[in-house]
Image (tube, rainbow, N blue to C red):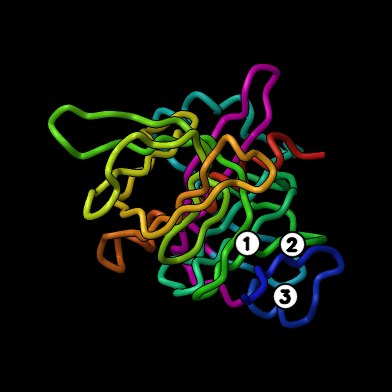
Amino acid sequence: MERIDIDVDPIAPELLKQFNALPCQTEVHLQIPTPTKPLRLRSRLIGIEPGMCVILSRGMDQNWEAARDLIREGQSIVVRIVNEGDPNATIFAYRGSISKLMSSVGRWVVLDYPRNVQKISLRQHSRLPISLPCKLNTSADSQESFDGLLKDLSLNGGGFVSRPIPLPLTKKAFTLELAVEGQEALSITANICNQHLEQRSPEKVHYGLSFDEDEQTKQQFIESALLEIVQRENKTPG
């Protein structure tokens, strides 16, 4: 089993090179802490000036409007950059702050350059150990739903742990559903390919899932799930 790449401070030269080479228009997810719950914003990468700053587009949707008073110099912010199209489903993340707002050329937000970067990359055949609440729904007309935890994730499937599912499982399609704060749940069609008792909780069963979708759909689901994992790890910057 290959390892999941998680690189933290100090920034390794190769990681720094990969970060600086992220292309313009790459999707960026921002999270701003508030006393109630973090505000989530979506942006696009305008460019990176190595060692100096990261420049993002300033959105105009209702979420940006709601965060208007917090888009200011010195505001702490969590940055997650999704490297779209990367077959390894890679996300770069760091904690920083807004250094400047610009409007002379475009509606830009200038962030400080990261002092450390986290990279999460899910490689082919590797499994990332996680723990996300989820549901497994039958696709039959009389839909049944089973609550559990997604305990691991790979590019082609995952591990679902729950109480025993009292149904014949062969040749039955399910929908795996992950709740995401502030947006529609993530879902993907899956088949159960194996099962065994969970070692630490023998009253529960670990079901091995195989995703039954085209490569693009699987890639989008994995990227969104990884992003949700990273966002749950740190609700606010330290």
The residue that mark 3 highlights is: 16
Q: Position of residue 223 (x, y in %)?
A: 46, 57
Q: Position of residue 21 (x, y in %)?
A: 59, 77
What residue is pinned by disc 2?
A: 117
Identify the magenta region: 21-46
Whether the magenta-drawn stretch holds residue 38 is answered as yes
Task: Using the rendered image of the protein, determine whether residue 103 is visible from the camera's viewpoint.
Answer: no
Residue at image x 60%, y 53%?
80
User: Does residue 144 lie above or below 88 as drawn?
Assistant: above
Q: Position of residue 168 (x, y in %)?
A: 27, 44
Disc 3 marks a residue whose amino acid type is: Leu
Can see residue 181?
A: yes
* 77, 73: nearer the viewer: 77
Q: Is residue 199 magenta?
A: no
* Sequence-wise first label, 3 or 2: 3
Quadrant where the N terminus lies? bottom right
From the image, state whether disc 1 or disc 3 is nearer to you.
Answer: 1
Secondary structure of the residue carrying tag 1 is strand
